[in-house]
Image (spheres, coloured by chain):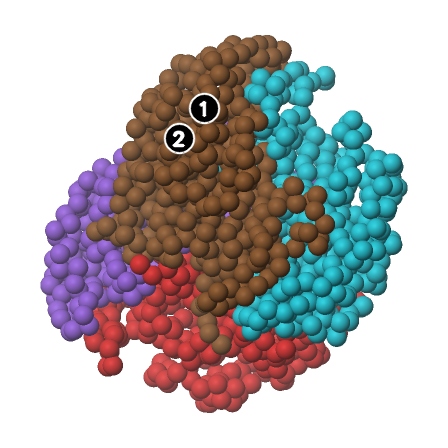
Chain colours: A purple, B red, C cyan, D brown
Amino acid sequence: MPNTFGHLFRVTTWGESHGPAVGVVIDGCPPRLPLAAADIQGDLDRRRPGQSDLVTPRQEADQVEIMAGLFEGRTTGVPLSLLVRNSDQRPGAYDEMREKFRPSHADYTYQAKYGLRDHRGGGRSSARETVGRVAAGAIARKILALAGGVEVRAFVTRVHDLAVPAAALVDFPTLAEVEASPVRCPHPATAAAMIRRIKEVRAAGDSVGGIIQCRVRGVPPGLGEPVFDRLEADLARAMLSLPATKGFEIGSGFAGTLLKGSEHNDAFAPREGGGVRTVTNRSGGVQGGISNGEEIVFNVAFKPTATIMQRQQTVDLHGAATELAARGRHDPCVLPRAVVIVEAMAALVLVDHWMRQRAQCGTFDF
Amino acid sequence: MPNTFGHLFRVTTWGESHGPAVGVVIDGCPPRLPLAAADIQGDLDRRRPGQSDLVTPRQEADQVEIMAGLFEGRTTGVPLSLLVRNSDQRPGAYDEMREKFRPSHADYTYQAKYGLRDHRGGGRSSARETVGRVAAGAIARKILALAGGVEVRAFVTRVHDLAVPAAALVDFPTLAEVEASPVRCPHPATAAAMIRRIKEVRAAGDSVGGIIQCRVRGVPPGLGEPVFDRLEADLARAMLSLPATKGFEIGSGFAGTLLKGSEHNDAFAPREGGGVRTVTNRSGGVQGGISNGEEIVFNVAFKPTATIMQRQQTVDLHGAATELAARGRHDPCVLPRAVVIVEAMAALVLVDHWMRQRAQCGTFDF
Amino acid sequence: MPNTFGHLFRVTTWGESHGPAVGVVIDGCPPRLPLAAADIQGDLDRRRPGQSDLVTPRQEADQVEIMAGLFEGRTTGVPLSLLVRNSDQRPGAYDEMREKFRPSHADYTYQAKYGLRDHRGGGRSSARETVGRVAAGAIARKILALAGGVEVRAFVTRVHDLAVPAAALVDFPTLAEVEASPVRCPHPATAAAMIRRIKEVRAAGDSVGGIIQCRVRGVPPGLGEPVFDRLEADLARAMLSLPATKGFEIGSGFAGTLLKGSEHNDAFAPREGGGVRTVTNRSGGVQGGISNGEEIVFNVAFKPTATIMQRQQTVDLHGAATELAARGRHDPCVLPRAVVIVEAMAALVLVDHWMRQRAQCGTFDF
Amino acid sequence: MPNTFGHLFRVTTWGESHGPAVGVVIDGCPPRLPLAAADIQGDLDRRRPGQSDLVTPRQEADQVEIMAGLFEGRTTGVPLSLLVRNSDQRPGAYDEMREKFRPSHADYTYQAKYGLRDHRGGGRSSARETVGRVAAGAIARKILALAGGVEVRAFVTRVHDLAVPAAALVDFPTLAEVEASPVRCPHPATAAAMIRRIKEVRAAGDSVGGIIQCRVRGVPPGLGEPVFDRLEADLARAMLSLPATKGFEIGSGFAGTLLKGSEHNDAFAPREGGGVRTVTNRSGGVQGGISNGEEIVFNVAFKPTATIMQRQQTVDLHGAATELAARGRHDPCVLPRAVVIVEAMAALVLVDHWMRQRAQCGTFDF
């Protein structure tokens, strides 16, 4: 289970940072979905290293190969198998990590858990693993789009202490607005400041974190399962399963705890054209674990990248104190590349819950 | 799956607010564990309604009955079945909810999902469901304690805008310190202010939320599974599966995004007596999804209780605008009773991951 | 997982032979199903001890109590919790088993696995556990009937060496034909011989086994999942999970291995009214793991009851050779009571696969 | 789930008969296992087409490539990803199958389930899928061997009506005895007759089936889980998930139903050197779903190959009656190549249950 996500739309990723390839198997994909490599490549390109001067210069074309599951341009209902080859490997660059644990990385915990580890570029703990998630997420997003125009949009709202003004976060951003800047913040002035900050930090051999917001519109009411598989619980798990994440909040989130119930409750009102809407959306599109048809809105906190170009105090495999030298390639800020990964995980959660909802509530009619 | 939690230590809860009983089945419990109803009752009493004048006056003795799985005072490895009868039911008190959706409750979403709902006291969406979680959690906590002195301690750190000073949160609180006040905040001055605030809010027919912190000490390195079943991902899911939760953060959390990497990284140092420790704990006891032996520290945000004693705008089953009258019993602040529920869920996550770790890394020795 | 069956229609049984009750929790039941205790009681009565002079005289009314999941006569989509109290317990009757392992029972293996066991009446390994399966199966059968007239019919085709003539097995038996004799064999002459044989064997303190055939008609094409969750694979697992079963075969089964391919293949022909049928049914209603719309036909082998009224050589808890005295209550032949259990398990498999089929192939339409 | 097998040692296969490759991802493999491609290749060679003149002449080298999960010759605890390229593809040879359903194949049911199918060589329903099972099984067998000398040995005991004499089936056959003949029957005289029969049948454009027996020795007591995940239930499912299987029996099986309880029960006796043994083994090594330390013995029935070189009556995609011409490559008898597949599936079941047993009963010590 550890490398599989989802119950009905099941995604299993495999591969290490410096192995021959990384990949993903998707089991349970609905049949007859029109699909081509190009549907997946667009999202991989948004995750790709070397795409701008804000991110790691590792050179990877990240071309997806579809090994199974397609026939004459459509999914057949059997497993899709996708892989992306690793090309720009510099395993020698990691010789120091063989013996020394990098602070705030997974080196020590993998060693403690498994009794050995592939130290090259973090091995399996590398964010390179997310290639498979993004590839699967691209398929999930296509399903959601075809299913009824569901759109998943993530974007950077804060880098370090530079935040988009709350007043600028009202509308659902377009993809073009998000992609307009390499930092993937849809507010141009803030984006410009973020870019400057990231470059300054990189120049200093340091790193920064921040916050990504994700919104989903078009989700019908009824997705999500009481009591443990609430939609927000699965979204939280999905986000906290991403490297470098430290927090998740939905709707009013942590700030909502400062309101009273009379200020926080979302009054119901009739929806034009039938149905029910909420006048406000402090619930974030989910009530009692189930979507209510409003926009799903959540935030994810990313810590500053653990890899920095500064000497650090650490311990070696034998338990002796030592220092780690400063070198290697890294992202001074993971958020620009993480936007599409957040979207992918959100889409995977939604497709899976959609299928679960239909299975229980749409199979038999009494 | 929706009502089951865990992979190897599997907990399935059942029951509605106004049915004859609520219960839980625990499958996978290790055999030979000494267990009696008294081991469970203590935690149920901490969750029980009517335990203080800060919480709902609903009268429930919440006496646990063990229906299966014990033999001569020990678990046998087969399912434990526990139930707690509902006694203080006032189904008539909920007649208005049959037709009207309570704002920020699960009424509308259950109706949308299932096409019908048990409206009495929220039915399955009632926090009464957590009786089963607490009962199972008590068993998990006993296992953790016997396994090696692992302690799980949750406590209230903020109610509305009243927060324990950060400087007072250094030491691991004792159970006695937490239980010293009915609000379960271990800082006496803040606890006193919180109690006043909750009483004021209740008098005004309103409600408040806040933050619960949970710490776990004694966890060995190696628990947690890359890449999707990270320990923090499963903790996040566990917490967001609780009623009224809106956010989760581990270690440095959202605030940590304001630091640079050079400020945020946890340097490693040799641990006295062997092994490795971190000098700081911004990681919150987890690195790369796996416990590192430090204290696990996380926060959970609870929104203000949705039930308030004020008239509210809503919609009825037929989609027409209407008003909901103010009445019923409720908790003006769920946090005091939620403390033991947070502990229960954390313990369930840890026992499950402990078993998973042993299964993969401790079954065969090469 | 060990005590849970199914992926989407999930059944978890609990309880021991001499505990206070046995029960079952059903998670994932479709909402809005009309349901009452009477829908379940009929099947429990067919499994009940003491129902005829062919079966154990243990007296159990086996009245089902619905503890959760129903509201105003319909399922609500949340877990159903059912229990049946144990009344005729004679734990003292089992004192000898505390120290001695009964041959061909689970006494030794439970002790070896768990390091302790509830020896009273076999504890969890008792066929009393199947009460929960039958209760859940009754609900599954109601769903199948309402879904489209699917009928599941099991019946005894052989006891010891007394078999129904093959020529008499052509038509789908009616429930009345099966229930016409207490041995549940629809062929009156064979049934009469079987009854005589069972009585003779019981008089000699011995036991017999035999074969149950199960047929299902009305199943639409498309149920079953390649490659591991084939319909026949899940049926095989379901049947081999029943106490006393030693074999399973579908369609032509073991005898089919004596045919050549040219004799064995089921030719296809157009079905009147549209669609496809097979001219013969050696496939048993399943091809490539997926139902083809023909009758599903399989056989299950049950060994002779392990409990016999004769002295037997065995070993005690301390590894010493000893003898087991002959006493207790038992079924000289389990097949008459097992018929409804086989039906229950078949129905559980089918409902689960129906939901899975719809989830993948019926949720999204491209 | 459909393409994944196992709970803790999880195997997911992917790939079609005429896609670029077939493969398998193994999640949960214990770390530190010494492993090289050569450990896997031996079993793949036993499954390979073209290995003798009894099997299909399709030419596939079936060289395994390890894409992930190994580091310096040992498993690391992360997913293993293995693939085998397809080379001898003749998709044009299958043009007739695009429109016509082959009798007793999965063509019609895949079409009915998914609304489309990859008709080339059966697509996903081809036995080529078992490449992944055999590769994973080779790893499982290595684990079992290193864990304590557990040996899994399958062999052909009947082809058509040619059976090994019962008296010749007493000893556990050596691998050399099984591999001594291309038909993999360890009884030389019977093997010779089987080979003649297969060649006769092939010459006539026909096919035959038969029975494979599998034995496992060295399994410790305690593996298997009540009540649904019994060891024999999981073995049954594993075997019925293989293409062309129609039946499974363990221990005394179907023939055991002809005995009385007094004849069938396995008396217990002290085991030399401590512990308990059974005097006979009609239980087949499993009691109450749990291994008892005796040899595990089961039989699997394989139908005659559905592909035959004779004209057959069938139906086309449009529901019209038609004929299928006789051509293509095929195995006149699948049993010789299925031996290693049966071993693989048995090994997968055992490793998984071993890990489950340790997780529940070996993680905590009370």
Residue B225 on image: x %, y %: 38, 59
User: In the image, A173: left or right of C361?
Assistant: left
Quadrant showing the C terminus of chain B: bottom left
- Judging by the rendered image, the residue that carries numbered circle 1 is D195
Can residue A230 be seen? no
Please name whichever residue, A99 or C16, is drawn nearer the observer in this view of the structure: C16
Q: Give amino acid for label 1.
A: Ile
The mark found on residue D181 in the picture is 2
Q: In this view, does B295 lie above or below C80?
A: below
Residue B291 on image: x %, y %: 35, 67
Question: Is there a contact, CB below 8 Å, between mark 2 and mark 1?
Answer: yes
The subunit carrying tag 1 is D
Q: Give amino acid for label 2.
A: Ser
Please name whichever residue, D237 or C141, is drawn nearer the observer in this view of the structure: D237
Please name whichever residue, A55 or D48, is drawn nearer the observer in this view of the structure: D48
Please name whichever residue, C308 or C92, is drawn nearer the observer in this view of the structure: C308
Residue A202 on image: x %, y %: 16, 57
User: In the image, C365: left or right of D352?
Assistant: right
Residue C160 on image: x %, y %: 75, 43
Please tell me which residue is depicted at 16% across the width and 71% down the height of the picture: A313
Q: How crowded is mark 1: few (under 14 residues within 10 Å), some or many (20 or more)?
A: many
Can residue D281 be seen? yes
| Distance CA(mark 2)–CA(mark 1) | 9 Å
The subunit carrying tag 2 is D
Please tell me which residue is depicted at 62% across the width and 33% down the height of the picture: C253
